[in-house]
């Protein structure tokens, strides 16, 4: 269990940072106005996602959720950067 907790907490951190950064980029005013709010929001998102992922019983499903969540969050972040630079 301690190794699983370490893996989930370390995988949930980039997920929450990427997700909150993407929303900060997409909000009106750009990321400069929302950077502090995104950083403050990433901590509760990190704890919530780590708690949800720890509730998953099967290891294979957990790995799929971790990989898929991080992939989706970073894809959203890349799209938000492209949209933000196009405006």
Image (cartoon, grey):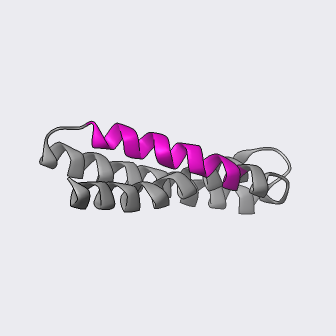
* Residue sitting nearer the eye, 75 or 10: 10
Residue placed at 55% from the left, 60% from the top? 78
The residue depicted at 57 percent of the width and 43 percent of the height is: 44
Count of numbered circles on the image: 0
- Based on the displayed image, in which of its 4 quarters is residue 10 positioned? bottom left
Look at the image and give the residue range highlighted in magenta.
38-55
Quadrant location of the C terminus in the rendered image? bottom right
Q: Position of residue 9 (x, y in %)?
A: 39, 56
Closer to us: 23 or 43: 43
Nearest the camera: 61 or 51? 51
| Helix, strand or loop: magenta stretch | helix
Name of the residue lying farthest toward the front = 2
Expressed as whole percent of the image width and height from the top left, the position of residue 80 reads: 63, 54
Q: Is residue 54 magenta?
A: yes
Q: Position of residue 61 (x, y in %)?
A: 18, 43
- Asked if residue 81 lies left or right of residue 71, the reply is right
Asked whether, in this view, residue 4 is left or right of residue 12, the answer is left
**Horizontal arrangement in the rendering, residue 57 relative to residue 41 (left or right):** left
Say whether residue 30 is left or right of residue 38: right
Q: Position of residue 41 (x, y in %)?
A: 65, 46
């Amino acid at each position: 269990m301690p190794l699983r907790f370490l893996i989930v907490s370390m995988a949930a951190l980039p997920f929450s940072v990427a997700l909150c950064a993407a929303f900060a980029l997409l909000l009106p005013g750009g990321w400069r106005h929302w950077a502090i709010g995104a950083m403050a929001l990433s901590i509760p998102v990190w704890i919530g996602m780590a708690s949800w992922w720890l509730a998953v019983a099967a290891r294979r499903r957990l790995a799929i959720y971790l990989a898929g969540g991080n992939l989706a969050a970073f894809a959203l972040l890349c799209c938000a950067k492209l949209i933000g630079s196009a405006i």
